[in-house]
Amino acid sequence: MRPEIENLPGSRIREVANAAMGRADVLAFWFGESDEVTPEAIRDAAIRSLQAGETFYSHNLGLAELRAALAGYASHLHGPVDVDRIAVTSSGVNALMLAMQMLAGAGDEVVAVVPVWPNLTAQPAILGARVTRVPLRPDAAGRWRLDVEELCAAVTPRTRVLLVNAPNNPTGWTLTRAEQQVLLGHCRRTGTWILADEVYERLAYDGVRCAPSFLDIAGPDDRLLVAHSFSKSFLMTGWRLGWLVLPRGHLDAVGKLIEFNTSCAPVFVQRGALAGLAMAEDFVPALVQRLQACRDRLVTGLRALPGVRVAPAPGGLYAFFRVAGQDDSLAFAKHLVTRHGLGLAPGVAFGAEGEGWLRWCFASHDPGRLDQGLGRLAEALRL
């Protein structure tokens, strides 16, 4: 087996989950998904598609009507995005892998803003690229910040790809418009591609309709790929559907890669996505309102506990927090799940930059579960 594969680290989140395997009493907040089911209108559209016998291959790039709907959705949020820049993919992570396959190969340099969901930095490593990590850093209140000058210094003409996830998993950090403009201008000068993971863009809080996107400021010919997913904003994690926004002239290339990876996304899943887009401007704001209430409830409760350092995330699904004296996040997460039935993700799962921190997914349709979890954490800190 290739050493790049043998050397891939295992999932630290899964390691914590395995420590509680078979226990029904665990309150699990370790995965990045809501515990709400997919909206009924989306499920019904998929059922109708299956009942109509739509069980065959579709176009590599996705149903024409779904691509048109996605172009309209993106244009509504960010200004004109033509349908010839849209490709439907079999999940957001598939969109990211396809993008990386287009851009990076053995020996290429990829610069990544970290801590970040480990799949993003594993993908270029699988392809044999070298990953240079530029860390976000927390301030005294627990808010994570980017040193833009440090990042620009790391991105040189040798850098093939700049990988940015904002709003960020796990920290909730979100790029400002000014930071985006600096990065886009710098990458234009160095000839570096930007791969922007913007799957959490609609999960932006405190009155923000949508997090800043590179699509707001980039031209259709810029070296920019933007990855999206139906998982978070439409409660479709198990459906495995995403999309890519590409520069003009790149659809044939990504279509070939889709053929060699998955061939196409299932038609009935795409029909469900069409139903989701049709209700997006009613459903998504209501979801965000519920999620913000969960975020505020959890952060307030965490701040009331001794030694906890946390700030409300401006975007995403997570409270990323630190407990004084608990510097080994994996050991602490295992202790919490085995002794107290509280399942959280260890910060080290997102890279060494997250060590000592814990990630708590606050997306719960029952706020009482968050209160129960806070009670278990309080018990752990008293012992």
Image (cartoon, rainbow, N blue to C red):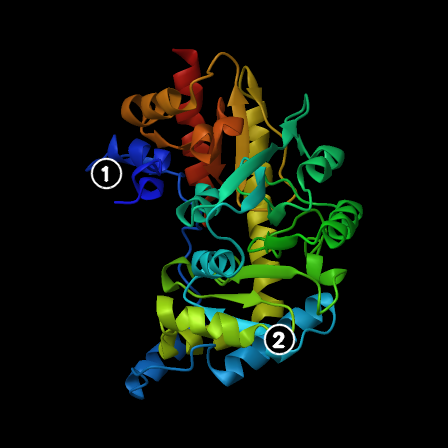
Q: Secondary structure at mark 2?
A: loop
Q: Which residue is mark 1?
A: 24
Name the residue type under label 2: Gly
**Where the C terminus falls, by quadrant?**
top left
**Where the N terminus falls, by quadrant?**
top left
Q: Position of residue 296 (x, y in %)?
A: 60, 38
Q: Is residue 374 above or below residue 68?
A: above
Q: Which residue is at the far bottom?
A: 52
The residue positioned 54% from the left and 66% from the top of the image is 244
Q: Is residue 113 left or right of residue 54?
A: right
Name the residue type under label 1: Ala
Judge whether residue 184 can be spotted in this image. yes
Foreground: 78 or 318? 78
Sequence order check, earlier mark of 1 and 2: 1
Q: Which residue is mark 2?
A: 249
The residue positioned 69% from the left and 72% from the top of the image is 75
